[in-house]
Image (spheres, rainbow, N blue to C red):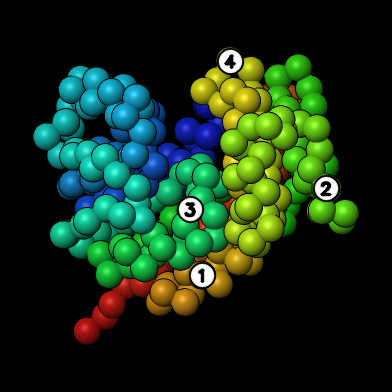
Amino acid sequence: MRKYHNIIKQNILHKYKGNLLDIGTGNGGDLHKWKNFRKIVCVEPDHEKIKVLKERISKSEIRNRISILQNTIQNVELRDIYDVATCFFALNDFTYTNITRMLSNIAKNINGIFCLIFFDYNLFSDDINSSSITYKQCIQTEINQFNDIIDRSSYIYLLSSLRYAHSECDNIMYINITDSYVINHYECAINSIRVKEIFVKYGFKLLNEYNVDLFPFLDKSQISYTSNIKVIEFSNINEF
């Protein structure tokens, strides 16, 4: 799965250059894909992930081009203008309000391309429950009822209930991928229609939108899982 995701991201990043703003950098798995960028700024709030990210940067030949801002993208203070902004597989940790606040905060610092890779709830067809991947809806939306997959005494249940009740997401998804960083993870189900509406509101135009190609080395459950991935590229290039 990681190999597949890396191919998707590499196919996007090789097209661009200039200053890069990477949102939700995580452990820095994309670092080797940034060689064509002049300057890279990573925005990541998680302290433990930043430890790994710093270690990877210290060993990189482009380490002098990379800086880290430990903050959320909704609250970070940016001074520079970026030719490219990327948010790869982090958008599903955002609610629709989070996305709105992100753009309210940083849209003025983007003059170029904003590229998203995320799991589009519009593409979701059925739960996946295999030995390698579990990907399930937590809410039966037709009756507004939570499934037993969330412990009702946990903070996740309370948070999920509030988000869904206030239309901050379309569902809550449970994900567990064997031999990966994604273990017993909950994320927001967001749909591409709402995402595009929010970006247009902040002056972005749709440049490209597509579902990713499915490679033959994926097994049946991996194909089902990755068939939910959407790539959207926006542009707000100001021409004078």
Residue in the image at 16% along x and 59% along y: 79
Which amino acid is tagged 3? Leu
Q: Which residue is mark 2?
A: 145
Residue 211: x percent and y percent?
63, 51
Which amino acid is tagged 2? Gln
The kind of secondary structure element at disc 3 is strand
For marks 1 and 3 on the same chain, the one whose residue lies earlier in the sequence: 3
Camera-side residue of 38 and 105: 105
The kind of secondary structure element at disc 1 is helix
For marks 3 and 2 on the same chain, the one whose residue lies earlier in the sequence: 3
Distance from disc 4 to disc 3, alpha carbons, whole Å, reads 25 Å
Residue 234: x percent and y percent?
45, 65
Q: Which residue is mark 3?
A: 116
Please give the label number shown on residue 179. Answer: 4
Residue in the image at 82% along x and 53% along y: 144
Which amino acid is tagged 1? Ile
